[in-house]
Amino acid sequence: MGCGFMEERLYMRSFPLYDRRLWLLAASCLLALVLGCLALPVDWALRAVMGGGYWFSFCTLGLWIWVIWDWIAHASNGFELRRALPLAPMALVLCVGLVWQAQETHGFKVLADESLLLGTSQGLHMDRQVGYPVRATDVQGPFQILQAVLDKRPFFYPFLVSLVHDLTGYRSTNPFWLNTLLSFVFLGGLYAVGCKVGGKKEGGVLLVLLAGGLPLLAQQATGGGFELLNLTLATGWWWLVMRYLESPDNRSQDALVLTSVLLASTRYESVLFLVPTALVLALAWWREGRVVFRWPTWVAPLLLLPMFWLNRAFSANHRLWEMQSLGADSPFALKYFTSNLGHALAYFFSFDGYQPNSPFLAFLGLLALPIFFLWGQRVLRACASADGTELGLVVGALGPLAVTGLMMIYFWGQFDHPVIHRLSLPTQLLMLVAIAAVTGKVLKLPQRGWSWLLALAIISLACWSLPVMAKNAYGRDYSPGVAMAWRREFLAQRPERDFLMLDRDSTFWITERVAATPVLQAMERKTGLIFHLRNHSFSAMYVFQTFDVEPETGVLKILPEDDLGPDFELEPITEKRVQTLRLSRFSRIVSIREGGEVVSRQDFIRPVPQGVMKPSEQEAAKRAYLDRWVKELP
């Protein structure tokens, strides 16, 4: 006991506070905080994000690629591909990833998030501006975004999608293919973490099988959201934490720090991973008695400026929290903890197929977590002399643990809600790693024990997960997702795409290169709609509306945000039930009333005799018409 105390005293005395590079890093962090939180007014911060966000992401990704490449090139083991990724695990990763693709269809899984992320990627691709489109047209030939709005969501994922657009051409399905690729990368990273934590390849195989049996991951692997990118980066970050504390050096440190920056730029709450990253650096320098430092680590805090600016805009507008939808009065509070914990247990142990869960994973995870935390306390108490991998494993757990704690006090942290399922993924990553740690480092299972666990994981995958994925009840229970799929069906039947769509979710249509405008804005610009209806600017004008069915009378009640008012005469085209007592309908605008005038749509314009115009007169008339055409857009 005395020797251990003296050893820790020696380490404390050797912490390199005198190193100028440490103070240089502190100055960089302080500069980032001042520029991000104090120096710019909110309006300027918004402009800085919209105009400079693309280039910040471009530089961050480029620097991260260089750092990773430099680290691999100088790694002592050379990172031989055959040793790092043997054929059998690669085949397992491929099979599990293909099962996900076979069981789910490509499409938006969470309506608001994914369509807006695609819209932001479209703006980054076309204009290098951060923001999702709300009005667009192709009147002058090329498709143009007329109005874009800055989204509250971090934009690193849309930036990656925009790169896919740049390299392969714009397609609204590109996010689905990016997530398909990320699903294989995630499974490969999870296998690497499982091998390192479990101490043998069976640990990696177990984690891949357990993850493969989680329907929520299959859903995200075929959707257009940023959850899988966030999970992939978190998995890689955790592996880098363990690798760095094993043998601290400047290249692995740069890789860790830049990965944490990308992670913080992917989801709101992932900024919490910056705290354990800083703790890891401090622990490594303390244990080594020296500062490990290169210029990428110094630059990293400044690369977070767009996230600081975006957060200022988000914090200034409390309506963006959407608390009114649930009647909440604060976004975070301890009073939500008990309720959210109950919802989490309802999600983890639901057996009706309406939750994309894995009860087997939840059972093992909740058994492993207390043991893992008790073992982790012992590792932290001996942090001066602890094994680097074990210390990195425990400190790395603080990231997903902090996110889990935040979700438990979040007003909308109900894991069993269709929109919120995905927020449980960091928690389930924590469970997965805890299972590998307990089996490999605490219990130190013999080979027979590993074999039994692997057999049970395969049985759970075959007997529970695959049937649940096949039924897909959890996907069909989410009415906005059903409505979005129906929009795609409607669009597929009209490949000419020369119509105008009025829809409160106008971004979806714009990402499909269809002229569109929100319903509310169309009502405010009724004169413009009349102009275009009279002049046959579009082959048709459609409106998408949603109705609730009164169960006693069967009367349809339109949602207020979809109501165009009595001045619009609509002709229903088709309708579909998207949920019990709720249906959606496509209608054609037949006529519009403005004052005493009624303008009706005609299938064909009747020609009238006219004089011959000179070419210059025709060109001038065309320019004047186009100018007014754009001004009158709804």
Image (cartoon, rainbow, N blue to C red):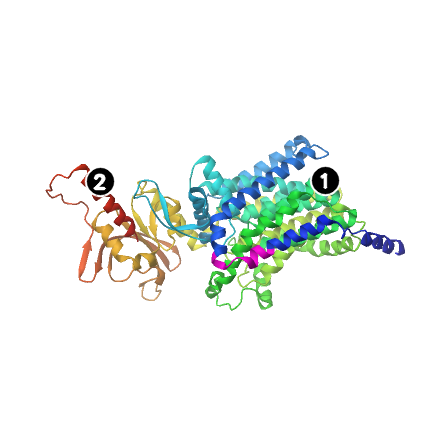
Quick check: 67 above or below 348?
Answer: above
**Hey, what amino acid is under mark 1?**
Lys
| In the image, residue 629 lies in the stretch drawn in magenta | no
Residue closer to the observer: 569 or 598: 598
Q: Examine the rendering and report whether any part of residue 560 can be seen.
A: yes
Badge 2 crowding class, 10 Å Cα cut-off, few under 14, some 14 to 19, many 20 or more, is few
**Hey, what amino acid is under mark 2?**
Glu
Q: Secondary structure at mark 2?
A: helix
The picture places residue 591, in percent across and down from the top left corner, at 22, 55
Q: Which secondary structure class fits the magenta region best?
A: helix
Residue closer to the observer: 124 or 341: 124
Left or right side of 474 for 382: right
Q: Secondary structure at mark 1?
A: loop
Question: Nearer the N terminus, badge 1 or badge 2?
Answer: 1
Q: Residue at x 32, y 50 (%)?
A: 501
Q: Residue at x 64, y 51 (%)?
A: 28
Residue closer to the observer: 517 or 222: 517
| In the image, residue 42 lies in the stretch drawn in magenta | yes
**The N terminus is located in which quarter?**
bottom right
Q: CA distance from mark 1 to mark 2?
A: 75 Å
The picture places residue 95, in percent across and down from the top left corner, at 57, 37
Left or right side of 375 for 58: left
Q: Examine the rendering and report whether any part of residue 454 can be seen.
A: no
Magenta span covers which residues?
33-43
The picture places residue 524, in percent across and down from the top left corner, at 30, 59
Q: Which residue is mark 2?
A: 619
Q: Which residue is mark 1?
A: 200
The picture places residue 457, in percent across and down from the top left corner, at 63, 45
